[in-house]
Amino acid sequence: MLEKHDLETIGKIVDEKMDKRFEEYDKKMDKRFEEFGKTMDEKMDHRLHETESMLLDEIDRVRRYQEKQTQELKQDIRKLKELNQCVRLQNDTITLILQIVQNLQERMEVIERKIA
């Protein structure tokens, strides 16, 4: 059988080998985590870039749509102003015609009185 001293020596050797294995395992895991972190950073950067690009495209699309709508509204307002001006001119013309008709009626009444 093995003596106590031999068992202690074997225990120390096993402990040293286990410690060495754990250190190697820790280094491997650290390396894997570092690689994983880099990969995730690259993926996140790529996805952020895609998202940013998509958002910028959408913002540009909305801006173009709004500009088109604004131009259409400006054109409609211009047309309404022109129509309003035409209506005012027509009203002025109708008012003048009514005044002329009223003056002619008054003149006709004067002439009818003179004839009668």
Image (spheres, rainbow, N blue to C red):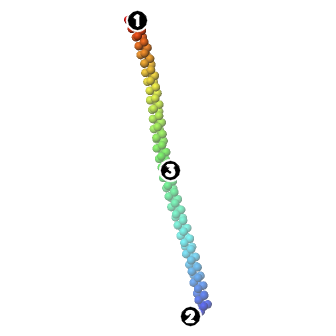
Q: Nearer the viewer, residue 99 or 87?
A: 99
Q: Secondary structure at mark 3?
A: helix
Mark 1 or mark 3, whichever is nearer to me: 1
Q: Nearer the viewer, residue 89 or 42?
A: 89
Q: Are marks 1 and 2 in contact (CB under 8 Å)?
A: no
Q: Secondary structure at mark 2?
A: loop
Q: Residue at x 57, y 81 (%)?
A: 17
Label 1: which residue? Answer: 114
> What count of labels does the image hold?
3
Label 2: which residue? Answer: 1
Reading the chain from its start, which is encountered first: label 1 or label 2?
2
Q: Residue at x 57, y 73 (%)?
A: 27
Where 89 sits versus 68, above or below? above
Q: Are marks 3 and 2 in contact (CB under 8 Å)?
A: no
Q: Position of residue 96 (x, y in %)?
A: 45, 19
Mark 1 or mark 2, whichever is nearer to me: 1
Where 24 sits versus 78, above or below? below
Which amino acid is tagged 1? Lys
Q: Secondary structure at mark 1?
A: helix
Marks 3 and 2, Cα distance to the nearest angstrom? 79 Å
Where 49 sits versus 104, above or below? below
- How busy is the neighbourhood of tag 1: few (under 14 within 10 Å), some, or many (20 plus)? few
Label 3: which residue? Answer: 56
- How busy is the neighbourhood of tag 3: few (under 14 within 10 Å), some, or many (20 plus)? few
Marks 1 and 3, Cα distance to the nearest angstrom? 86 Å
Reading the chain from its start, which is encountered first: label 3 or label 2?
2
Q: Nearer the viewer, residue 36 or 116?
A: 116
Reading the chain from its start, which is encountered first: label 1 or label 3?
3
